[in-house]
Amino acid sequence: MTTMTAQTTQVYQVFIKATPEAIWEAITSPDFTAQYFYGARVEANATRRISKMGDITGEDPVFEFDPPRRLVHGWVSYYDGDLAAEPSSRVTWEIEPQDGGYTRLTVVHDELEDSPKTASSVAGTGWMGVLSSLKSFLETGEGLF
């Protein structure tokens, strides 16, 4: 997995022994996200992405919806009041099948220029934790948290 420090554009990449369709379902279906994304139930469709964590619900626009290849959506960290007060940023999920039965997942979190607290929050272990848990979930049936 690769990452950049808390900058305005952060890039993460992981190889997962799963099909693009399985990864797509895992990132857009609340029954799956709850198992690896810190308990958050995330649902995405062609127009919006809704996330529920406990009693907090957030909704972000979807800019691109191309199953099972590409999902681009807005991002607000609704789970924290200080972070939620910052302007929306953008997350891009790129799913690319590879020879050998695995898939490369690239996550780009950008447009963070006016959201420094969010940039720091999601840098490093933020996104890397989610992606590591996603990989574990898809390959073993168990997320990390």
Image (spheres, rainbow, N blue to C red):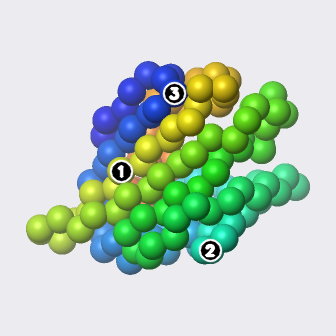
Q: Residue furthest right?
A: 55
Q: In the rendered view, would you say 50 is above or below 114?
A: below
Look at 18% across and 71% down and name the residue there.
Answer: 101
Mark 1: few, some, or many residues within 10 Å (few <14, many ≥20)?
many
Residue 29's spot in the image, x, y percent? 59, 73
Look at 42% across and 48% down and name the residue there.
Answer: 107
Give the Cα separation between the discs numbered 3 and 1.
16 Å
Instruction: Indicate the secondary structure of the residue bearing disc 1.
Output: strand
Q: In the rendered view, would you say 6 is above or below 36?
A: above
Q: Is residue 95 visible?
A: yes
Q: Which residue is mark 3?
A: 8
Looking at the image, is mark 3 or mark 1 nearer the viewer? 3
Mark 3: few, some, or many residues within 10 Å (few <14, many ≥20)?
some
Give the Cα separation between the discs numbered 3 and 2.
26 Å
Report the amino acid beneath label 2.
Asn
Q: Is residue 122 left or right of residue 118?
A: left
Give the Cα separation between the discs numbered 2 and 1.
19 Å
Instruction: Indicate the secondary structure of the residue bearing disc 2.
Output: loop
Report the amino acid beneath label 1.
Thr
Location of the N terminus by quadrant is top left
Q: Which residue is mark 1?
A: 106
Q: How many marks?
A: 3
Residue 5's spot in the image, x, y percent? 44, 22
Q: Which residue is mark 2?
A: 45
Q: Nearer the viewer, residue 112 or 32?
A: 112
